Amino acid sequence: MTLALQALPLLLLIGLLFSGRVAPVPAVLTALVAAIPAALVSLPGSIGLPGFLAEQILRGAYLALQPMGVVLAGLLFHAAVSGAEASKDTEAATPRRIFIATLLAGCFLESVTGFGVGAVFALASLRGMGIIGAPAGAMALLALCLIPWGGLGPGTLLGAALIGQPAQEVARITALPNALWLLLLGPVLWRLCGTAGLAVPAAEKRAQMAYLLAVAALLFGCHWLLPFEVIGVIATGLPLVFALWRLAPPQDGAAWRKAMARLAPYAMLTVALLAARAVPNPPAWQPFADLPAFPVTHVSLVLASVALLLLARRAGALGLAQGALKRGARPALIMLLYVLLARWMGESGATAALAREAAAALGPLAPYAVPPLGLMAGIVTGTNVGSNAALMPVQYKLGLAAGLPPVLAPGVHNFVGAAGAGMSFAVTAMICGLLADGTKPVQLWRLLWPSLAAVLLLGWGAMAFLS
């Protein structure tokens, strides 16, 4: 009976979201209601339930404040630069243009802004080239292959905070399977090009693999040198600039000025983030000694400052800012509710109890449950934040119970959960809605099944070789 009560909140959350009939807010609220009896049966007798719930609400709100700030600031930045993101490409489709639009430019924009912006940009570019239907939708979804660093990584940051591990170390583990997956997406894209009636020559395949190797090497190697928040931007941005220059070098001063103007906001943001991280011991707000501090150089505050500076130069800046914040209100609320659920479940002991039972039941196979559980969490919740808040604490405890290094299970979960989120019910429905031609999510999944299979295999491989 106790185990059933402890499992009920997560089962309700997953079941309601999987049904497709319940929106995220009521689904999480239902899980929160179920988490109250789960906490009651899990808490030690010396701790009162009302005081525990109230304290965790305060702690959860503080924890959620940082990634919520990143999300809202990211939307402000997106509003400030949105005019530069619209695709103007009306030329005929070529394998190189498709590759740049999806696995370079799309990934870059997703790393900067998050919220599926990379896929929306990629889809607009592909449609401008005359590619439509399920192949276009599936190609656009490839732009979401770096979600752990998307929007400067609020999901990774939140997941690490919930389990009390350094976000940099979690991201470093995530980077290895994600970099290998990126290399496998080249053949997936070539297959999709063939489906769209466009053959990819062998020489072009070699060139694209060279670009992907550069991105993968930067993605993996930079975690020893740079803060994880900016690594997605750098790993995709540098190859993107080179690829665009090779594709269409600016021919005169006006073309160079236009190119520089489009790159300036992203360069400004990257420099500001790196400069902020270089400040030693910045002033910080830390109301809870055992929770991460909120420094004045936090990525959300830097991102918001850059976004406001850029917005100030645009006509109708107030309306753009209001629209961005309005768009962010619902995701921010969902993020807060997910964090509260994770705190009530985790700090009461319910999460640890579920992990111990799972580890005992699975025995030596326990580590290999992490990838499918993470993939399912991403597909159901539709965001890296949701996936990490719902299951990363369980995966962390499962890894500890199985004797794994502390950041291994969270790092692998961060990879597979984010990959699942990029092909989730919510995201595929969004892409199909933008296509507006009768394409169904199942058609996208049929085209992308090799990518999903590769995620699971790489997740299992990471659990086997890094443990």
Image (tube, rainbow, N blue to C red):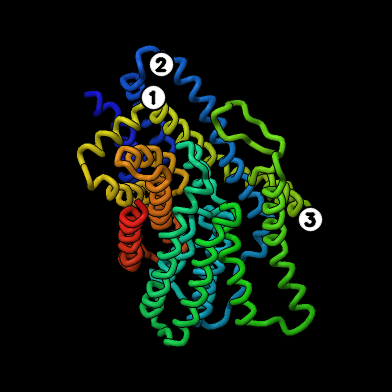
Query: Which residue lies at the image location 42% right of the left edge and 61% below the top edge?
Result: 432
Q: Which residue carries the number 2 mark?
A: 49
Write down the quadrant of residue 292 in the picture: top right
Q: Amino acid at mark 3?
A: Arg
Q: Which residue carries the number 1 mark?
A: 348
Q: Is residue 42 visible?
A: yes
Query: Which residue lies at the image location 48% right of the left edge and 55% below the top edge?
Result: 147
Q: Residue 405 location, x and y as percent? A: 39, 45
Q: Amino acid at mark 1?
A: Ser
* Residues at marks 1 and 3, CA–CA distance in whole angstroms: 49 Å
Q: Which residue carries the number 3 mark?
A: 313
The kind of secondary structure element at disc 3 is loop
The kind of secondary structure element at disc 2 is helix
Query: Which residue lies at the image location 38% right of the left edge and 72% below the top edge?
Result: 188
Which is nearer the eye, 314 or 397? 397
Q: Are marks 1 and 3 in contact (CB under 8 Å)?
A: no
Q: Is residue 370 above or below residue 213?
A: above
Q: Residue 60 location, x and y as percent? A: 51, 30
CA neighbours of label 3 inside 10 A, class few (<14), some (14 to 19), many (20+): few
Q: Residue 416 location, x and y as percent? A: 38, 53
Closer to viewer: mark 3 or mark 2:
2
